[in-house]
Amino acid sequence: MTPRSNVMSKTKESNNTLRNQELQSLHELARELLKLDDYDRMLDTVVQHTLSILQGERGFLVLKKGMGLDFKVVRNWRRDELEGEGEPISRSIVKQVLARGEPVLIEDALADQRYAQTESILRMQIRSVLAAPLEVDGETAGVLYLESRSIRRLFGPAELELFLEILELSSRAVENCMKRLLLEQRNSLLEQNFFARHKFPGIVTRDDAFIKILETVAQVATSDLPVLVQGPSGTGKELIVRALHLNSQRSKRPYVTVNCGAISPHLLESELFGHRKGAFTGATRDKTGVIDTADGGSVFLDEVGELPQELQVKLLRTLQFGEIMPVGSTQPCTVDVRFLAATNRDLEIEVKKGNFREDLLYRLNVVTLDLPPLRQRPSDILPLFYHFLKQTAERAERPQPRVSPRLERVLQDYAWPGNVRELENEAKRLMAVTPQDEPITVDRLSPRIGRSSAVGERVSPASLAEQERELIELHLRLTGGNRTRAAQGLGISREGLRKKMKRLKLA
């Protein structure tokens, strides 16, 4: 072998060794991410491993937050260096990556005409920089940034390629984490804007359709129009009705509720309209009815579809003329109330059946709000769950427990036939059965939800299989389809790789 051939052979061998080390590092990162059940630790692990693999000195992961930036993971950096006065080079590059959606490589900032005279470059003596966009649902939502202040040309085209490989490998875990963080940010912004201008106690939502319902509530609340709220049990009809009152001009006046399905017809008439002494056996004194009590305010007729037909006639008169006739009285009383009603029945069907008066329906449903079941609001499941966890933890004066990502997936996949009320009960139950300082895990779910998740996992263990598929495809791509080298990088035998590829139906 000639000296040149010997040098070339050693160079090739060195390159192969380096590449195998890189593949092993990628494999370790993937294995670490699969083990983690905590989103914050996942993001921190991505930044930590990326710095280690590329030998960067410091780095951070940042998300867009309104018009600003939210630094989620910061490694080897002082906060004042990122958030101080002036425009640090790091923030300039982050904004550039966010605007263009493309990675940035600076091999030697002090020798680069674009940056050499930048005050922050000179002050911090920044040499090499790598930054790349992080995407959520196809849109740039954040940036991963690395830099070195001591070694020029630490990062070059080869390091950029490896950097992007790391991001591709971590993309699913990072995207899931960021989705969660962006949901939290969006809720915060909603509270600062729309939720700050209006009163929606107890209502938590990220769902666009439900937010439109709240916008309608805000618009019609200031009028005196009757509002009918329809929807399955447990969807939050009472909260919507209360919001209508709290955002109205009657908010400082009485708000009275009567459940039309929980009281016998005889007593319901007296409850609504009041009675005079001697009107019936047991009427030993005059009684003021709910409608009269709420004079100047609002009356909430819960389960109005259960209202007996004989009382529907009396209620219709009150809606038409603003008058009530107490039981046993011959003189009507004038009242000023706003009627708000809710039902889990389809009143149009009840009209066709002859169970509900059509003219009363037209008086009640001047404005109708249809609340969707929870299964049609999938983006609300986790925010509501964490809201109920926080409430329960505060009442119990204990820390809010962590929740495993696997449990979150099960909660999102469950149909929730009992809607928000069922979700609230499950959150309270999980808090009760989970020891303090321990995370909430799938094995603590109610049997009905646990059985549902077990069936789903047996049918389609999608998350683990997808991550395993992505890892194998990455190693095959990095090795040019060489199965032996790919298997080595994965830490398994060639035959083991063949079996995995067959199971995952990889060509």
Image (cartoon, rainbow, N blue to C red):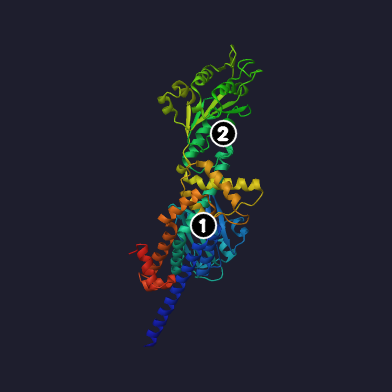
Quarter of the image that includes the C terminus: bottom left
- Per the image, the residue denoted by label 1 is 94
Residue nearest the observer in this picture, 139 or 374: 374
Q: What amino acid is at disc 2?
A: Ala
Q: Residue 228's spot in the image, x, y percent?
A: 49, 29
Q: Residue 203's spot in the image, x, y percent?
A: 55, 40
Specify which label sits upstream in the sequence, 1 or 2: 1
Q: Secondary structure at mark 2?
A: helix
Tell me if residue 200 can be seen: yes
Q: Secondary structure at mark 1?
A: helix
Q: Residue 246's spot in the image, x, y percent?
A: 59, 32
The outermost residue toward the top is 330
- Per the image, the residue denoted by label 2 is 243
Q: What amino acid is at disc 1?
A: Val
Residue nearest the observer in this picture, 415 or 489: 415
Within 10 Å of disc 1 (Cα), the crowding (few <14, some 14-19, many 20+) is: many
Frontmost of labels 1 and 2 is: 2
